[in-house]
Every structure is written in structure tokens, then in C-alpha cells.
Amino acid sequence: MGAGALRGVVALDGPSGTGKTTVARKLAQRLSAGYLDTGAMYRVITLAVLRAGVDPADAAAVTAVAKDTEFSVGTDPERPSVALGAEDVSAAIRGNDINHAVSPVSAVPAVRELLVARQRRIIDEVLAVVGGIVVEGRDIGTVVAPDAPLKVFLTASPEVRAARRSAQDTAAGRESSQADARASVDRRDRLDSSRAASPLRPAEDAVHLDTSELEIDQVIVALRELADHRGLLDCAAEATR
């Protein structure tokens, strides 16, 4: 991947069901930028923890697994990938067992420290090659990339978020009623917002964008305009793609 139209880091934060992953990938595709799903990194560690038979609430054991786990995440938005060792686990990390266990694993301070350091290295590597990257997660603007020139906190109503999560689960072949999805979303919000290490919250200088009534393309347009207003776009490069 050569240099794209985006210059710098776009940090996208927000809870599940706000469209974060979809819009982050599509924005990166449109701007020929890199893309990093930091949540996938916590999910692959969670998968390793569960496969090791470790209790996600056992911080010391979880940390030991995290330190020993070899994994990789792709940064090409056209072909995002997640591998545990040599195994493609892109689908496995989206299972309900991972959904249930990822919050306690993500709350372990040593795990966050380990992964944040790696996320920063990945961001620096992509910036050096491509020039820009869209990074999504729950602590990008506050912890991972606090100096990002554009920070956006995506929101949506609980009902909309639950409906989206239920639709995602159904599309992936996992049975999930909207009530179940709402309970899962509420639980994840509560755990992520109350953890001691890097809780889910908007950066003080983040732009808040409610996606409840917006189609994906409308969100992409809004994000592109925000990036343009911040002087982050090489419009000539964008026009040639």
C-alpha cells in the first residue's frame, strides 16, 4: 500500500453498536489509509486465555497468557486479518464466548499496557509508510493516540445499538434476540466504563457524532468532512484514487 490521502491519525472511539468498525474500515478504504481495530487485539488475547483454560478474572494468569501469545493484526482495510500464531481467527474472535469474556480481560492493566505499546508501534509503522491511519477502539483518543489531530466519539441510542448488534449476530450465524443483544450491550458498557484502567470515555477534545439516524455513507461523509476541516486530507491524492 502506497501513500494515501489521509495525513495523520483519525481516532474513533465509542461503545459497541455505534458502527465504529464498519465506518472506520470504509473511511480508511476511501482515503487509502491504514486501519487498526484495537478491539480485535483484546479479542485475540481473550481467545488465547479461553483456550488456555484460564479464568478471565484471574489477572495474573491472564497477563501471563498475554505475554506469551503470538498474534498479528492486518492494517489493510481491504483485507483486515487477525491471526493467533499461524491460525486465522478473524471469525473465532467474534463469538459469543469472546463477547462475554473480553471485558474482564481488557480490564487487566498489564494487558492494556502491553497492547497499547504495540498499538502505538503499529500506528507509527503505518504512518511512516502510508501517511495516515484510522484507529478504532475505546481508548484511542484518551490513551493510545492522545495527540491525534482528529478524535471522534461515536454514539447511538441503546435501542439502535442493540438492534445493530442483533443484526450482526444473525448475519454471522449466531442466534441473538434484540433483548439478548441489549443485555449484552448494557453489560459491556457498564464494564468498560467502570474499569480502572483506561475506561471508555470520550477525550475532552473529541467530536461527538450520534449515528442513530445516519446511514453508514452519511457517517463516512461526516468523518471525511471533519478530517478535511482539520487539514488532514491530501485532496489531490484522494482525487487520483
Image (spheres, rainbow, N blue to C red):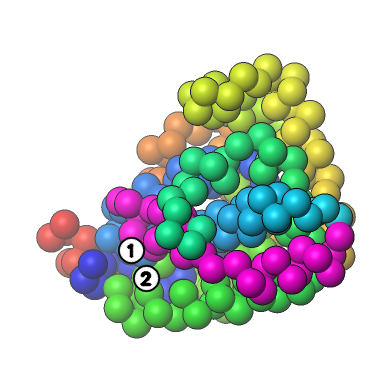
Residue identified by numbered label 1: 33
Q: Position of residue 121 (x, y in %)?
A: 50, 80
In the figure, is residue 201 to the left or right of 117? right
Residue identified by numbered label 2: 132
| Amino acid on which disc 2 is placed | Gly
Query: Residue 200 falls in which quadrant of the image?
Result: bottom right
- Specify whether residue 163 is in view: no
Write the start and end of the magenta stretch as one range: 58-83
Above/below status of 104 relative to 5: above
Tag shown at residue 211: none
Let me know if residue 214 is in the magenta part.
Answer: no
Q: Position of residue 62 (x, y in %)?
A: 77, 63
Above/below status of 122 relative to 29: below
Above/below status of 120 relative to 138: below
Which numbered disc flags the more N-terminal residue, 1 or 2?
1
In the figure, is residue 39 to the left or right of 22? right
Residue located at (54% from left, 68% from top): 70
